[in-house]
Image: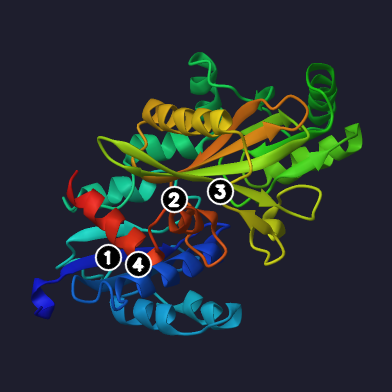
Amino acid sequence: MLEKDKKCIGIIFGGDSNEHYVSIASAKTVYEALISKTNIDRFRVKAFYINKRGVWLDNDHSLTLLKENNRKETVENYQVLPKSEINFLNKIKFEGIDIWFPLLHGLNGEDGAIHGLLKFTQKPLVGGGILGSALGMDKILMKKIFSHLAIPQVNYLAIQNRDLSDVNVKNNLSVEIIEKLKLPVFIKPANSGSSLGISKAKTKSEIIRALEKAWEIDSRIIIEEGLDIRELECGIIGNLKLFTSEIGEVSYSTDWYDYDSKYSMDNQIIIPADIDSQISKQIKDIAIRSCRALNIYGFARVDFFLEKISNKIFLNEINTIPGFTSNSMFPMLWNASGLNIDQLVAKLVDISSDL
């Protein structure tokens, strides 16, 4: 096939987010899948790296970054380019893109911001739209909707419009948390990913420190009861019809599934998870129902808790741009479901073409 007859996929990655390096790793995986022997005759790639200052780099710089076997020190060199202009789209050539593939985890990506910008190009994109992305990213709004729909969740409190720089406010909140929720609790920024900014707290002093840590990332905070659970995850792909992957379980040696655990080689991934068929069906049904409720389509990963003592299922969260790294659960779930990474990436592009 001639180069001009191939679909041009525009990968966008990096970004002004605390998941910057995860985004780069995900973009490398997707890039390699698009140019693999399986897909090279169908696709060509343009890449757009957004540095930590929010400046977009051109295709040549961006592809170099994807092709290099770089370390964090190498990536830092890209933070000084360009030196003067702050116009984030200056000299960026969007021409020729057929389908966008945004891989911006966290702020300005998973929250729907990039989807809103790309909508003006009038080209399809891989993943969901503005509304579903924003709701999936915001843990407070997501939980309020799920509460209204009686989708099972752990007990929680939402904090917003509170000044946590005030010592009295922090003290009063810590008392409220202890009175209303069973300890331990998990304290999370409402808008963050990869477990960044999250803490497990068992005492009043730990709760105050955890609130301070979360508030550094987001002024809106969610507090959840910490149960003795198993971590189960389910992949979703599709548009008018959503399809579920096998259910996977993550077994980790740490006290809880924090950032280091998520990107550790020491985790044990079990796919399919060793669970009862009725629980598996329940998880898949809730996964589809919850995605429909938030208008999430394209692809997503839905995370669940299975309480060990009761065998009850609780929806944890929905990730609308899940990780695509070599250690990421989403591609592993679909690999176990019959789609290797090359097939999965091509399938996602095809789904976006049907929107």
Labels 4 and 1: the sequence-earlier one? 1
**Mark 4 or mark 1, which is nearer to you?**
4
Whole-angstrom CA distance, mark 3 to mark 4, is: 21 Å
Say what amino acid the circle numbered 1 marks.
Gly
**Alpha carbons under labels 3 and 1: distance apart:** 33 Å
Tags 3 and 4 touching, CB below 8 Å: no
* Circle number at residue 342: 4
Residue name at image x 50 percent, y 69 percent: 25
**Sequence-first disc among 2 and 4:** 2
Q: Amino acid at mark 2?
A: Ile
Q: Which residue corresponds to the image point at 45% horizontal and 59% vertical from the top-left?
A: 335
Residue 85 seen in render: no
Q: Element at badge 1?
A: strand
Question: In the rendered structure, which amino acid carries the disc numbered 4?
Answer: Asp
Which residue is the site of mark 3? Answer: 272
Mark 3 → mark 2, Cα distance in angstroms: 22 Å
Residue 148 spot, x, y in % from top left? 50, 14
Horizontal placement of 182 versus 23: left or right? Answer: right
Q: Is residue 186 left or right of residue 209?
A: left
163 and 210: which is toward the camera: 210
Is there CB contact under 8 Å for labels 3 and 2?
no
In the picture, the disc for residue 321 is: 2
